[in-house]
Image (spheres, rainbow, N blue to C red):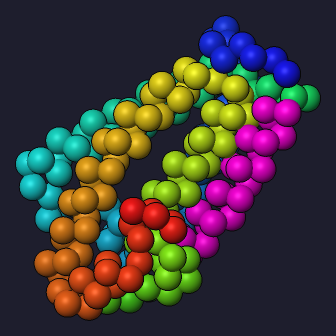
């Protein structure tokens, strides 16, 4: 098994950008198809200055992650690629399910159907695990070094969103929070 985690960075057509940009593209496609859900997803009118800072840091790290993925080769023909691809594919299917549940839900109620029964933040969670799968498939510590602070920064956005949902949906959301973990099966 090739254990060179700090691979030479080189731009390529078959690099980690394929799964990385694929997950981002899915978000744009869903927002275009489900316009009301898309508007809700990008509504930042409730952001505090702290939320804006967290969102900016998260966005910058995501952009760095995407740019870096252009230069990180996938480890085709290795166990890293097989395991990472499986993690990515499972995450991708769950990510699509989360987006579908979100996009098709009414705006005046907390989303509790589909995969939201097991996670309050499945879109984020499965985006993270999809990117972890990409890190594994490319055996890249470069990606992981950027992914970890991106996950941490995004966690603070999630805390802000949960505060907003509590203010917006009240007791119904509080009860949902009590029975549904923030990140699938834990936390």
Look at the picture and state if 14 lies above or below 103: above
Screen quadrant of the C terminus: bottom left
User: Looking at the picture, how far across and down is residue 49, in whole percent?
Assistant: 8, 48
Q: Is residue 109 visible?
A: yes
The residue closer to the viewer here, 110 or 82, is 82
Residue farthest top in this picture: 8
Residue 29: in magenta span: no
72 sits to left or right of 34: right
Give the image quarter of residue 7. Answer: top right
Look at the picture and state if 121 lies above or below 92: below
User: Looking at the picture, how far across and down is residue 168, in whole percent?
Assistant: 17, 81
Q: Is residue 25 visible?
A: no
User: Looking at the picture, how far across and down is residue 146, in whole percent?
Assistant: 45, 28
Magenta stretch bounds: 79-102
The residue depicted at 74 percent of the width and 54 percent of the height is 89
Look at the picture and state if 67 lies above or below 28: above
The residue closer to the viewer here, 25 or 64, is 64
The residue closer to the viewer here, 179 or 129, is 179
Give the image quarter of residue 60. Answer: top left
User: Looking at the picture, how far across and down is residue 115, in whole percent?
Assistant: 55, 77
- Tally of marks: 0
Residue 89: in magenta span: yes
149 sits to left or right of 137: left
Screen quadrant of the N terminus: top right
Residue farthest front in this picture: 186
155 sits to left or right of 10: left
Chief SS of the magenta region: helix
The residue closer to the viewer here, 30 or 173, is 173
The residue depicted at 53 percent of the width and 29 percent of the height is 144
The residue depicted at 74 percent of the width and 41 percent of the height is 84
Residue farthest left in this picture: 49
The residue depicted at 63 percent of the width and 13 percent of the height is 6
């Amino acid at each position: 098994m090739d254990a060179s985690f700090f691979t030479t960075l080189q731009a390529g057509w078959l690099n980690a950008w394929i799964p990385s940009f694929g997950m981002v593209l899915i978000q744009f496609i869903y927002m275009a198809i489900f316009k009301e859900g898309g508007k809700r997803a990008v509504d930042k009118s409730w952001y505090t200055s702290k939320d804006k800072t967290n969102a900016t840091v998260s966005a910058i790290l995501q952009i760095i992650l995407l740019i870096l993925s252009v230069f990180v080769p996938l480890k085709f023909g290795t166990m890293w690629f097989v395991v990472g691809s499986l993690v990515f594919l499972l995450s991708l299917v769950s990510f699509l399910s989360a987006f579908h549940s979100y996009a098709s839900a009414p705006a005046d109620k907390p989303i509790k159907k589909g995969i939201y029964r097991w996670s309050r933040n499945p879109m984020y969670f499965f985006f993270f695990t999809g990117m972890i799968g990409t890190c594994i498939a490319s055996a890249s510590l470069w990606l992981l070094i950027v992914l970890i602070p991106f996950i941490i920064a995004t966690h603070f956005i999630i805390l802000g969103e949960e505060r907003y949902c509590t203010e917006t949906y009240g007791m119904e959301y509080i009860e949902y929070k009590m029975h549904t973990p923030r990140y699938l099966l834990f936390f």
